[in-house]
Amino acid sequence: MELAEQLPKPKQELTPLPFTFVRTNDKQIAEFIENRMPLISFTSKGLKPKTDEEIVAVVKQQKVGEQWYTQDYWREKGQPSEQIEIRLDGHAITLYNFRPEIQLTDIHVEQLKESLGTFTARFPNAMEKLRWILIADMPNSNPWGDVDTFPLSGTRSKSLKTLRLYPHAFASESHRIQTVSNLEGTIAHEIAHFIHEDFREEWSESFQWGSVSNCPNIWEPVPRPDGKKYYYRNKDTGEITYSGQFPLQPDACITEYGKRTWYEDIVESMVAYLYDPDRLRRVSPKKFEILARHDVNHPEPTVIAHRVPKDEVALPEIKPQTVFYYIKEPSQAPNLQATG
Ligand SMILES: [Zn+2]
């Protein structure tokens, strides 16, 4: 899941961020460019220009949202209990643990190194998109709405370059791909999401998904326990889908989880490709072949993991900064064409 951080009201007063927002007339130095006129009208009365205050509020929100550690959601968590600095042939990844009840054992650290090293050797372009690993609590709600069947182990955010691990990632059971630990499988699954788009076209040439809404005779809606949403049940087979999609070639899916959407299928297949390749080859030679074509198969990099001593654990420094923004007035953009 790609999760937008939800920003609840601050529980305690946070120190203000050291950002000063200054309007500039020089587009070149502007970090943000905002239109005075909204591009879409939400009222029947037509377009209303935004006030300076509204524009500054939008700019602030964007600036604060650029990094996880400038967001209230994370700042409210305070000091992490653990920090591990990981180096993969020069590429830096920092892990912070915000769940004091979870203590990373040496086995966890070895599994972490193994999974990052394996992925770097095979699909290095995905690793470039990862900078932070954050052990945290679950977000407000499970996106699939079903914690029991599919306990959430992790999520990632492309824009924040983060991989989040939830307590379940550290469960002693194996991953859905049963030849690997849940921690390693979860890390591989979430990193694979960074590049699942790269496989979309080749996948769709051979594998397609249908939408339940197009097949009301086969799929019936069933209310979820919370009563707010539905999942769908196949009237003939009893099979269930939570995403509203179903695979047209279900037998070629390596796990039940992979049946939810084309992109979950890609990443589940990738975990199998890395950790149970023979089974993937049996279940779907085509999927194996697509992944093998993208696999650069480099030698494993040197992976170093350094546990930062408890009293030296520190969040990234937020340096004071003047943030310049430029307001595009209506006269300067009469045809509302996007620039840049
Ligand atoms: Zn996923």
Image (tube, rainbow, N blue to C red):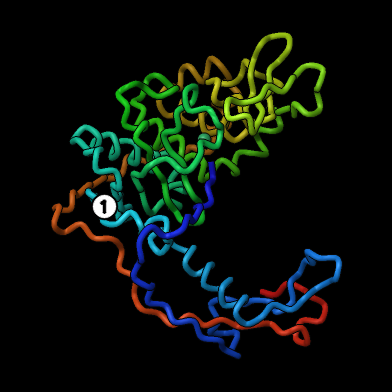
In the image, is residue 205 above or below residue 78?
above
Q: Quadrant of residue 180?
A: top left
Q: Name the residue furthest top.
A: 236
Q: Quadrant of the C terminus?
A: bottom right
Report the side of 335 relative to 51 (left or right): right
Query: In this orientation, which residue lies closer to the viewer: 259 or 201?
Result: 259
Q: Secondary structure at mark 1?
A: loop
Q: Residue at x 56, y 40 (%)?
A: 196
Q: Quadrant of residue 333?
A: bottom right
How many badges with numbers are in the image?
A: 1
Circle 1: residue type: Pro
Query: In this orientation, which residue lies closer to the viewer: 130 or 335?
Result: 335
Report whether the residue tagged 1 is closer than 8 Å to ligand 1: no
Q: Residue at x 73, y 9 (%)?
A: 236
Query: In this orientation, which residue lies closer to the viewer: 257 or 54?
Result: 54
Report the side of 89 relative to 326 (left or right): left
Query: In this orientation, which residue lies closer to the viewer: 104 or 184?
Result: 104
Q: Residue at x 51, y 36 (%)?
A: 142
Report the side of 152 relative to 328 (left or right): left
Q: Residue at x 34, y 75 (%)?
A: 319
Residue under circle 1? 80
In the image, is residue 65 above or below residue 287?
below
Q: Position of residue 31 (x, y in %)?
A: 53, 77
Graded by Cα atoms within 10 Å as few (under 14), some (14 to 19) or many (20 or more), the crowding at tag 1 reads some
Q: Name the residue furthest bottom.
A: 25
Q: Position of residue 34 (x, y in %)?
A: 64, 76
Q: Position of residue 149 (x, y in %)?
A: 49, 22
Q: Position of residue 59 (x, y in %)?
A: 56, 73
In the image, is residue 16 above or below residue 322?
above
